[in-house]
Structure formats: C-alpha cells, structure tokens
Amino acid sequence: MMDVVHNIFNNPLSSLLVIGNLIIIESLLSVDNAAVLATMVMDLPEKKRAIALRYGIIGAYAFRGICLFFAAVLVQIWWLKPLGGLYLLYLFWDWMKGRSTPQKSDDYFQKEDNWLYKWTSGSLGTFWSTVLLIEMMDLAFSIDNIFAAVAFTDNIVLIWTGVFIGILAMRFVAQGFVRLMEKYPFLETSAFVVIGLLGLKLTLSAVEHFYPETVFVRLLEGHTGDIITSGVTVAVFVIPMLTSQLFNYPAKDR
C-alpha cells in the first residue's frame, strides 16, 4: 500500500487527471442512470414513486460501496480486466444499436418486458417488483462504473478516491450535471464514446499477461498510458463543448 501511495506523490499530474476523470465519468453516468430509473417508476402512484426512487438511491450508494472493495480484486486477477473490457464494449455497442433505432429512447426502460419483473410482479406486486428491479439496475450500473474506473488505472487508492468522490457527486452535483446535459445533450454521446475507449483499453490489457515486456504493454499500463487515457477522455468531453459554444457544433439544446 505504501508503494501505491508513493507512486501517487511521484506522479501528481497523472493522479489528479485520473481522479478528475473518474469523478466526471461517475457523475455523468449517474445522471444517465437516474434517467433510466425515473422511467421505471412512472406507472406507480405519485407517493410510491418517491419511495421507490429513495430505495434506488440507497441501493446506488450501497452497491457502489461494495464495488469499491470488488475493485481491489479486479486489479489483481488479470482475466477479469479483459472480461470487463468486453462488457464495456458490449454496453457501447448496445447504446449504438439503440441510437440506430429511432423509436427507441436511450433513457427509456420498458420494465414490463423484463424477465425479473414478469416473474415477481404477480407474487410481490408492482411496487416491490419495481423496487427489486431498481436494485438490480443499481448493481449493474455500479459494476459499469467500477470497470470504467479500473480502465483508467490499477492504483487502488486512486480508484477508491475517484469513485468515492463520484458517489458524493451523485448526491451533491447531480443537478448540476443534469443542467449541463440539458444544455449539451451530446455529452451522453461523449460518455458512451469514453466507455467504448475504456472497454478497448481493458480488453487490450490481456496482451500484458501474455507479452508483459513489450513496448506496447509498457505504454498501455504505465503512467504515460494513464495520462494519455485521461487526456483523451478530457478531450472527448471538452472539445465538443468548446466547438458547440464557439460554432454551435454540435448544436446545443435551446
């Protein structure tokens, strides 16, 4: 653990970039996740909607906390990283597939088509089946975010720091990110492009196991690789915002 902390102080720029990117990714994905969860409670009575979403917030905190400990295991078992990379690439592909279907909204979730909801709604009722489905979605979202975090760095202290601050951001910064995404709706595209890039980086980590001494692996897994990954991530978010502000491309939502 002391070596991990020592590496942070030896590479402050890389560490700050990683933590900053983890906060951005966690916050943006949390806003998108919240939009999905909101659609799941729309058929409930108004008072029960708030209760179901409150359970969802509790579950989001709990599962992200659990996944923080899972991250320590993830960085130690080599084959979990490329497996997580393939999972992130699947999320990116599924999002792209959804974009190619005009009638499908990215933020809409048809819970009546879900096998868990169908299986439990008869015995538990619509409210508790919805709550159960929300908790399952919270778990899936938490796994998404931890895989994304590990793609930035293997430094467990940086992962814990960035994701923990991101968890706090879910509570205190969420509304700000909602307004930001309303003004710049293409930020959702940026978030999923980053997910795809992180999935590719994690998948390529399999090369490290089989060819650990190659120049490519030293670049991919070293501090230079962390800086490049963080820099590209910042560019994917910042450049479209700048061009939108200066040239209205991509177009802002007015």
Image (tube, rainbow, N blue to C red):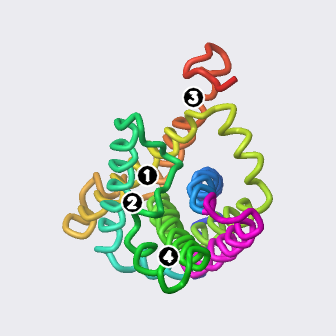
Where is residue 216 drawn, in percent x and y? 28, 52
Numbered badge on residue 221: 2
Residue 18 visible in rendering: no
- Asked if the residues shown at circle 2 and circle 1 are in contact, with their CB atoms under 8 angstroms apart, the answer is yes
Residue 102 placement, left or right of 223: left
Q: Which residue is mark 4?
A: 71
Q: Which residue is mark 3?
A: 239
42 is within the stretch colored magenta: yes
Q: Amino acid at mark 1?
A: Gly
User: What distance separates the C-alpha of mark 2 from that of mark 1?
Assistant: 6 Å
Residues drawn in magenta = 41-67
| Amino acid type, callout 3 | Ile
Q: Are marks 3 and 2 in contact (CB under 8 Å)?
A: no
Quarter of the figure with the N terminus: bottom right
* 61 w.r.t. 242: above or below: below
Q: Residue furthest bottom?
A: 123
- What is the CA distance from the residue labelled 3 to the residue labelled 2? 26 Å
Instruction: Mark 3 vs mark 2: give the one in front.
Output: 3
The residue indicated by pointer 1 is 225
